[in-house]
Amino acid sequence: MNQKTLQRGNPVSRFRNQLGHFGDVMHDRWMNAPGWQRWIVYIALIVAALLLPSESIGSFMSPDTDWASILFFPIGTFVLLAIGLNVVVGQAGLLDLGFVAFYAVGGYAMALLGTRMGWNFWLIMIVGIGICALSGIILGAPTLRLRGDYLAIVTLGFGEIIRITARNTDEIGGPNGIRGIPHPPSIEGGPVIGDIEIFKYGVLYPQPYYYLLVALAVIVIILVKRWEKSRVGRSWAAIREDEDAAEVMGVPTFRFKMLAFAIGASIGGAMGVLWAAKSISINPNDFQFMLSATILAAVVMGGAGNLPGVILGAFLVAWLPERFRGLQEYRMLIFGAVLVALMIFRPEGLLPSRQRKAELKEGSGGMGTLGAEVPGPESRGEEVASK
Amino acid sequence: MFNDFINQFWPSTIDGLSFGAIYALIALGYTMVYGVLRLINFAHSEVFMIGTFGAMFVPFAIGVDSALTGLALVGMIVLMILAGMLASAGTAVALERIAYRPLRKRGASRLAALISAIGASIFLQELFALVVIPNVFDRPERGRIQMGLPQFMERTELFSIAGHPVRADQVLVIVAALGMMVVLDRLVNRTKIGRGIRATAQNPEAAVLMGVDIDKIIRMTFLLGGAMAGVASALYLISYENTNYYIGFLFGIKAFTAAVLGGIGNLRGALVGGVVLGLVENYGAIFFGSDWKHVISFTILVLVLMFRPTGILGESLQQARA
Amino acid sequence: MRPKTARLGGVLAAGVALSLALAACGGDDTGTKTEGGSTGAAAKSVKIGFMGDLTGKDAGIVIPPRNGAKLAIDEYNKTNPAVKIEFVEYDTQGDPSKAVGLAQQAIKDDKIVALVGPAFSGESAQVAPVLEEAKIPSVSASATNVKLAENGWKFWHRVLPNDGVQGPGIADFIVDGAAAKNVFVIDDKSEYGKPLADAVRAQLKTKGATVTDDSLDPTESDFSSVVNKVAAAKPEAVFFGGYYSAGGNLLKQLRDKGVTAKFVSGDGSLDNGLIEGAGAQNAEGALVGCPCYIATPDVTDAKVKGFADAYRAAYKAEPAIYASEGYDAATVFIEALKAGKTAAEDINQFISTVDFAGVSKQVKFQPNGEVEAKDIYIYQVKGGKITLLGKAAEAKLG
């Protein structure tokens, strides 16, 4: 991007370009930074995450509802779900409209194993992740041979099937759901952050659960990053860009698509287990389609495929409606308008991955463009040409 | 169990057909937009919802509260269908202009357009719940926004099949829906606009080179799809006599399922898909209970797609692109 | 084209900025917190919360009790009492997880001393343990799920009998009062409708009636598969466990199909919305059971009439579903304040002794939080209006 393009157009598009340029510069600096500098930033981020639930931040961030509570749900929950969905949508390029199904499976695993079998939270977490991975594979086996939008409607259908089956099956509580889900086992006398023992899992204080969520998020982010940089990640990228070509080049596409589904499902499921362990009770209405759509919006809005972007997107999608409770019933109206405006303003997402941005410039958009898109005088194709 | 099926076969078939016809009309909107733009127009559900309120506005403004007969009845039905078409087509065109075209011009991904559609859908629902219904339809009491339509079309029995009555409104739904589909089929296959739509669906680059105004064609596609949803909404309203601001969601999902079932991008597929879905839901409910209806329809969808990955009739009519 | 879109973007951006500013103002309002509301007699006002779905899909069931509660509190504040009540609303949109966050906010920041709600059983199941630990008393005006009372909660109450009381009462009426031996029972698969319908089914069976089942999804609008089953079963009565919005549609579609069986429903359908949804002609004769005594137009009780008039004057609407329960729930706390109890735990102590004639019933609580009164009333739609038929145990269809 040269200086000329930065100054082109009206103020809005100029701002847009400059923002993109700034992002590029920061990204370059980050890529060239030595390892120890990056580690300092990582540690600073984790410390910041641990200090986040403080009241002084909360009074600005959420004047109308309890900040520490919304940090766990919806903010933290959405962030983790978005990271999971990003593996499926952002990295492997599979449009999944029923991601909430895995969250539900995780939640029900915790609820059933915890209340019926009396298992311990940690054990259920491990078993639950296994169950969700398995459910991802079961769901994926018949559907992953489908392409694009067929996959979208089928996953949407599976999401609804899971919810309705839970609602209609009296053996697992039917519409009443399950009550009395045990909390994670507390450790007395653990370290204290701001008057709260962080290993004491009670009812009144959400902070211990939030710290648990941060720990889970750190582990998940490290794993996802490693996968992204490995052969697996490159295979996903290849499948996303052109599945036929990938197949011809010897990538076992079906197996890798299945893997993406299983990993995404495990992350969603892990979050489901943690959420149910905090919630005491769950019921099928907690797993509506709207949640899948919201998480997908978070992923795309943040910048599908780019982890910091996805986290930012999830944070905003979860936080904005809570922050603006003062607007009362108008907040969802504005939320809808903001989604549309953001997609018009930055269709590539707030923090897009470099690859995605390049694709956008070519006009191919990644994951397929809208049909009927012919580079005309208004399209940005010429910019690429002039470069 | 099997006895139940025999007993309820005819009424279920009639209901399945008339509801399937409504699904099919809505599915046309999904299928046409998908054929041209490869976009799931997620906000199409709200196009339907707004159509029901457009149609509702006619009896509301005139102040109908008793049964009509003869010309007055015909006039009312025609006016409601027109109002529904106007409201729905207007919404669809506005959606295209505001929520999709800017994205299209920037070469955005289909995923971004999908999110834009979801945002627009939330916005329109809330707009109706908070602004339009309380003010236009005089329902200031928040939360109570289910709207009933006074019954102006008597539930006359026209004829009966095996002892099961078939009502006039059900016949109206099926006949009107079929009529609209024939009109649309003609429009797409015989007129210049239709040729433009087909050409764009096949190969937009070539269509532009041949002098097709692509923006206009896309606008027309949304307009036609919206108008079909408008007809569906008026027919639905006459038959079921109620609506609310969140009614679109379920219809949207089902109609999209119908479109995929029949073969998305394929006009006749939408008809087949809608009718199959309507029938399967009603037959399935006899065996498994009405609470399993959605599960039944989605299971059928998965099964069909496993054996025919492009739906019952395939994407053939408008030549699918890889 | 580009400048136009940009202008649109600008307009939207301005809108967002405006809303930000608005929100900031809103924030300032709530920012002035009255500290130490629960510290005792020194306080000039206390905060009482209301929690429920105020803007979501089911808001129609929650706004009337909110209005009822607000009415009681406004009336009380007008008498210029020593301790005024500040009414704080918490909109959960029916999402239990959000309800928990709001409850924390209510406890820690707003320091409420009592809560009317949560409105739904799902929310109650998650919020009640939090309130229990924070020792804040709550009285729900609409959560009827049986299981809620089985948790040993000391601070949780509800001002209406649960579904386990209502269901058998209605079933008795169907068999004895309405003389129906072949009954079709439909539920809406909700946390409210399913247990209620199950209770009706169980009691009908012990009374020797023939029961046929089906369920519907209340978000749908076409119930033809259910209606076809009813038509095939040829029952004498149909019971529907669910809310009035689906109930009205169901009743209409039943009558459209020529099903003339008596239509019976529970408290969730006791609303003019049932008549509106079904059409006055179709709704004529429909029966609705309720563990409540409501302000029907033909009501003679002066207290109930007075409430209905005040409600109409304040909200320009008929008192709808759970409105009188909301009023009574708030009155419980008002009584406590009148008795000089301003701290949360004192109020809870007082609630266990409370015993007054409310609008909907005699209000007196059992140790597990359930209300004592167990009377079920049957209402009937006559001439497009809901009228009282009598107590379920005594009412007879003429």
Image (cartoon, rainbow, N blue to C red):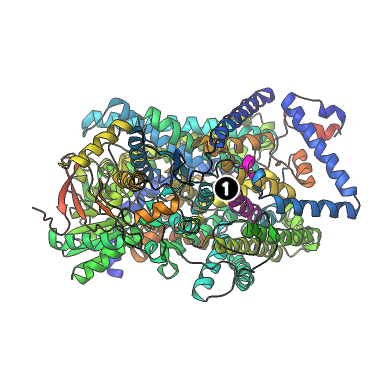
Chief secondary structure of the magenta span?
helix
Residue B32 pos. (x, y %)? 53, 41
Q: Secondary structure at mark 1?
A: loop
Residue C393 colored in magenta in the image? no
Task: Find residue A346 and report its horizontal and vertical position in percent.
Answer: 70, 37
- Which residue is most to the bottom? A117
Q: Is residue B167 above or below residue C130?
A: above
Q: Amino acid at mark 1?
A: Asp
Q: Which residue is mark 1?
A: A66
Residue C153 is drawn in which quadrant?
Answer: bottom left
- Left or right: B78, with B38 as reference point: left
**Residue A210's image quarter?**
bottom right
Residue A272 lies in what quarter of the image?
Answer: bottom right
Q: Which residues are magenta?
A: A57-82
Relative to A382, C172 lies left or right: left
Q: Quadrant of the N terminus of chain C?
A: top right
Please tell me which residue is depicted at 30% across the width and 30% down the height of the picture: B59
Quick one: C327 or C365, which is closer to the camera? C365
> B77 and A54: which one is in front?
A54
In percent of width and height, residue C76 lies at 34, 37
Please state the horizontal and vertical placement of residue C203, each as a whole percent of the image.
Answer: 23, 67
* In the displayed structure image, the side of residue A300 where residue A223 appears, left or right: right
